[in-house]
Image (tube, helix red, strand yellow):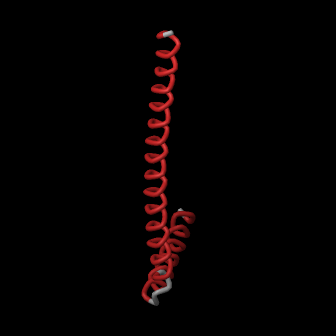
């Protein structure tokens, strides 16, 4: 029973301290930093996705070009 009462007292004290720090605005900078982190992470994810799409399109075009070149070479060999 003592542990429960002690845990409740420690929890209440911690809650009171956190509330006082919040009223003083100590957590505002943390909120701003988290917002900036979220913005940068989202931006970097979009950049990576666009880069992957561009790379996939490039590889697709390169494969198509090589297939056509191979077909032309095969046609030249078979037409002789």
Q: Residue furthest bottom?
A: 24
Q: Residue at x 47, y 73 (%)?
A: 36
Closer to us: 53 or 4: 53
Q: Residue at x 45, y 26 (%)?
A: 68
Q: Position of residue 64 (x, y in %)?
A: 45, 31
Closer to us: 24 or 36: 36
Closer to us: 35 or 54: 54
Q: Position of residue 17 (x, y in %)?
A: 51, 82
Q: Residue at x 51, y 22 (%)?
A: 70
Count of numbered labels shown in the rendering: 0
Q: Position of residue 57 (x, y in %)?
A: 43, 42
Placement of 79 over or under 17, stated as above or below: above
Q: Position of residue 15 (x, y in %)?
A: 47, 76
Closer to us: 17 or 60: 60
Placement of 16 over or under 78, stated as above or below: below
Q: Residue at x 52, y 64 (%)?
A: 4
């Amino acid at each position: 029973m003592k542990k429960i009462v002690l845990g409740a007292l420690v929890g209440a004290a911690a809650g009171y301290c956190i509330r006082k720090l919040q009223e003083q605005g100590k957590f505002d900078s943390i909120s701003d930093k988290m917002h900036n982190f979220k913005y940068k992470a989202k931006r970097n994810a979009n950049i990576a996705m666009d880069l992957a799409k561009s790379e996939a399109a490039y590889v697709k075009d390169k494969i198509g070009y090589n297939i056509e070149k191979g077909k032309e070479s095969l046609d030249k060999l078979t037409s002789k």
